[in-house]
Image (cartoon, rainbow, N blue to C red):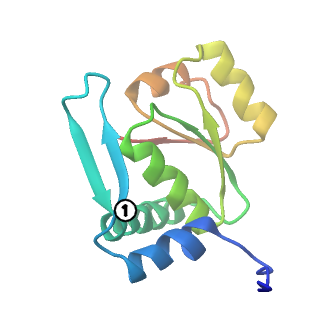
Amino acid sequence: MVVQTPIYFNFARDVMERQARERPDACALWCVDESGRNQRKFSFRQLAESFRRAAGLFHAMGIRRGDRVLTILPRIPQWWIAILGLTKLGAVPSPGTPFGTSEDIRYHPRGADALAITTDTVGAAKAEHFGGGRLLGVR
């Protein structure tokens, strides 16, 4: 069987949104906290709705196709939503660790040529020196 490779592949659009159409109620993301007691499940439909909203928000904030965005969040559902939203938009997510120091965060955006940083309040405090770009907060 020969499969034609698409000229432009977008994981959020070509895989996740297809699954949301074909298997909307199937489990797409299952997050469990470190204690193992708290868990949250997202169906493909729920995850697709969330990352579409995130893509719209990023677009409204001026993020465009090809823009690099540093994403510094713990591996919580919002991390996945941000990464998929940026991917859908055609932006380039650059995952960063929330364990980095202010110095690490100072270096990473320059090295990645990041236009913006998506982070939480802890990351925002470390990235307050991020000049010329935008800090996009996640709650």
Q: Residue at x 41, y 82 (%)?
A: 22
Q: Point out residue 29 in the picture as x, y percentages from the top left corner.
A: 38, 53
Q: Quadrant of residue 113?
A: top right
Residue shown at the point (42%, 22%) measured from the top left:
122
Task: Residue lying at the far front in this picture: please name it.
Answer: 1
Please indicate whether residue 24 sits to the left or right of residue 114 in the image. left
Q: How many marks?
A: 1
State which quarter of the image contains the N terminus: bottom right
- Choose between 36 and 82: the one closer to the eye: 36
Horizontally, residue 38 falls left or right of residue 138, namely left
In this view, the residue in front, 35 or 118, is 35
Q: Quadrant of residue 91?
A: bottom right
Q: Mark 1: which amino acid?
A: Leu
* Residue drawn where x is 57% and y is 58% of the image: 86
Question: The C terminus appears in which quarter of the rendering?
Answer: top left
> In the figure, is residue 43 to the left or right of 112?
left
| Rendering coords of residue 80 (x, y %) | 46, 49
Instruction: Name above or below for residue 59 compared with residue 79.
Output: below
Give coordinates of residue 18: x percent, y percent.
Answer: 49, 79
Using a 10 Å C-alpha cutoff, classify the residue at mark 1 as few (fewer than 14 neighbours), some (14 to 19) or many (20 or more): many
SS at mark 1? helix
Percent position of residue 105, x then y: 64, 23
Quarter-wise, where is residue 65 in the image? bottom right
Residue 1 or residue 110, whichever sits in front: 1
Q: Which residue is mark 1?
A: 47
The residue furthest left is 37
